[in-house]
Image (tube, rainbow, N blue to C red):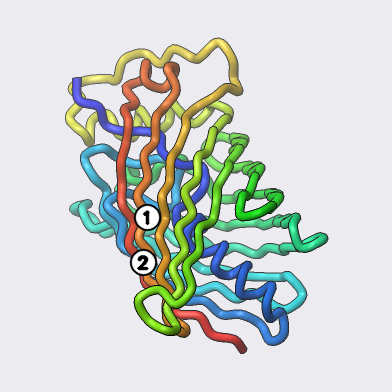
Amino acid sequence: MRTFITFILLLTLPDALFSQVVKDSARVSRDPGFLLTTLSYTSNKNSSRLANPIRMPALMANVSYYSNIGLYGTADYYQYLVPDTNTFEAEFKLGYEKTILDCIDLDFSYTNRQFRGDKAYEGISYNHALELSGSYRLKGFSATVDNSFMIGETNNYFLDLSLSHDFTFERFLLKNGYLAISPSITGSFGTNFWLPGIIDRTWGHHGGMGHPPPFVPPARKFDYQSVNLILPLQYTISHFTLSLAGFYAIPSKILKQHLWTNQFGVLVSLSYSLML
């Protein structure tokens, strides 16, 4: 039986790649504000928690503005390259971040999401999301807790626990070149109300015949869902940053019983930052 969907990251890859660049730069200079524009290509969907093992390549454009008082706004546009019909989504986020004692980062945000096109590429169907995260940094290590509430076709709550370490190299290759490598591991937990909807939307599209097998709800509504490994590399020269990230996701036994499989993907991005 053909596997058609796999669980990947709770954290979005663009956030994993770019948010640390923004925060590090903003800590150095909170006045004036900070503008970041990004263009990315990924071999999989790079905004949702789900990706497709038969590939869902997409282009992404992002514009983010971080003010000197911690308020920020972002706009993301995703264009999927494989569907026969025009398929895209847009996300608009407003948030506030606060750094305490130069080692604790707090972040709260609201996201409005719109999806149009082939529903098989939608992943979790939601229109609104609330996110609350906190991280503690010490000697290059960062421990992060992310809470996400998704409101839409079903209402779901997700919890991510992450550990990462930053390796930085100044004057790398060029006098003004800066290389950052930040391997991380994330354990993802969450509700399972989103599972039936995804199975219904994707079964026939990806080769399933007739009706999908009966959905057997897990014994617990909230449970461990996956472990995710990410290896982002960022090389910065002046205002430009070239990023390459590889990620590997291993779903839980429960998700594997519902046709999930391990997943590998790559994200390539070019960003431009500007102090305003």
Q: Is residue 271 visible?
A: no
Q: Mark on residue 95? A: none
Check the picture and name the quadrant holding the C terminus. bottom right
**Which image quadrant: the N terminus?**
top left
Q: Tell me which amino acid carries mark 1.
A: Ala
- The x, y position of residue 185, in whole percent, is 50, 40
Residue at 46% from the left image edge and 40% from the top image edge = 124
Q: Residue at x 47, y 67 (%)?
A: 169
Q: Residue furthest right?
A: 101
What is the crowding at mark 2: few (fewer than 14 residues within 10 Å), some, or many (at least 20)?
many
Question: For this rendering, which residue is in front, 230 or 210?
Answer: 230
Q: Which mark is on residue 269?
A: 2
Tally of numbered discs? 2
Direction from residue 176 to residue 22 in the image, left or right = right
Identify whether 207 is placed above or below 95: above
On the question of residue 195 being in view, the answer is yes
- Horizontal and vertical percent position of residue 97: 72, 63
Of 54 and 82, which appears nearest the observer? 54
Could you say where residue 146 lies in the image, as x and y percent from the top left? 64, 44
* Callout 2: SS: strand
Question: Which amino acid, by three-letter code, is at mark 2?
Answer: Ser
Q: Nearer the viewer, residue 25 or 14?
A: 25
Query: How far separated are the C-alphas under marks 1 and 2?
Result: 9 Å
Give residue 245's mark: 1
- Residue 73: horizontal and vertical position, in percent? 62, 70
Marks 1/2 in contact by CB < 8 Å: the verdict is yes
Q: Is residue 6 above or below residue 257?
A: below
Q: Is residue 146 left or right of residue 241?
A: right
Q: Nearer the viewer, mark 1 or mark 2?
A: 1
Q: Earlier in the sequence, mark 1 or mark 2?
A: 1
Quarter of the image for residue 40 reads bottom left
